[in-house]
Image (cartoon, grey):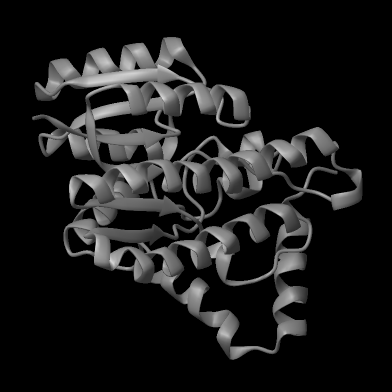
Amino acid sequence: MTRYALITGASSGIGLALAEALARRGRSLILVARQRDQLESIAIELTQRFGVEVLFRACDLGEPLRLSGFLLELEEGERQIDLLVNCAGMGTSGPFLAQDWMTEQDLIEVNILALTRLCHALGNSMALQGGGQILNVASVAAFQPGPWMSTYYASKAYVLHFSEGLREELKSCGIKVSVLCPGPTRTAFFGTAQMDTVKLERQQLMSPEEVALHTVRALAKNKAIIIPGRRNRWLAFSPRLSPRWLTRKIAGAINKAYCPR
């Protein structure tokens, strides 16, 4: 029976790069994102290039009822999913009190609630199948607080700690859990978060393809925490060397510099 890798946030950025990297290795895919037209063209292209089966489902993971419907479809279907990649995510920047609350709620729904619900639903399916693998996408932001992006940083800290906890819990079920913590990457994330992309373009950012290549190699080795790039590994480690008050100050100053004015 064909087994599938299900990837959320698969229409662009790291999610799309991971879909291509897995398809290149012969994996059949189920792609999930909001944009149906983009997913359809991506599915056709990957099928033609790599000769794999690529299915897709347009679903706004920030809407619990739509997510429930999607999970019901998966439960009633016959396709076995042995790799879940939770890549869908969003960010906001600027003063917390100035944010539109509905946007902040969407961030929490997608980055935390949908990710957790997918892990629960598909984790149970994998346990019944005798095993599988889960990759949750966090960020180097997960290792410290982030003033002026407070909700985003906190959501990624949740993903990191949740994933590490699941890794220990699910070992006995034959389920491997890893968490990807990329640094700043050349994606549409910064524009969506309304950050100063002109300043960011001056930085040496990794490409989504570089992140994906590093990630699939680390997944094959069952790495617990995947941090692509030496500079990003330093960004993740450096908060341990400073007192918390100083870590907050530095992160806040950096984030504020890229916030919308």
Q: Is residue 193 left or right of residue 3?
A: right
Image x and y of residue 94, in percent: 81, 49
Q: Quadrant of residue 219?
A: bottom left
Residue 120 percent coordinates (x, y): 44, 47
The image quadrant that residue 43 belongs to is top left
| Residue for point 52% across, 67% down | 161
Q: Is residue 31 above or below residue 85?
A: above
Q: Is residue 71 visible?
A: yes
Percent from the top left, x then y, of residue 247?
A: 69, 79
Q: Nearer the viewer, residue 91 or 195?
A: 91
Q: 147 left or right of 261?
A: left
Q: Could you tell me how many numbered marks the image carries? A: 0
Q: Closer to the camera, 255 or 174?
A: 174
Q: Nearer the viewer, residue 78 or 198?
A: 78
Residue in the picture at 45% in, 23% down: 70
In the rendered image, the vertical position of residue 135 relative to residue 208, given as above or below: below
Q: Residue furthest right?
A: 97
Q: In the image, what residue occupies the spot 9% across and 21% down?
A: 51
The answer to whether 226 appears left or right of 235 in the picture is: left
Along the horizontal axis of the image, is 61 left or right of 29?
A: right
Percent coordinates x, y for residue 236 in the rendering: 50, 73
The answer to which quarter of the image holds residue 250 is bottom right
Q: Is residue 131 above or below residue 38?
A: below
Q: Quadrant of the N terminus?
A: top left
Compared with residue 147, is residue 124 higher up or lower down, i.e. above or below? Answer: above
Identify which residue is drawn at 74% across, 39% down. 105
Q: Quadrant of the C terminus?
A: top right
Does the image show residue 226?
no
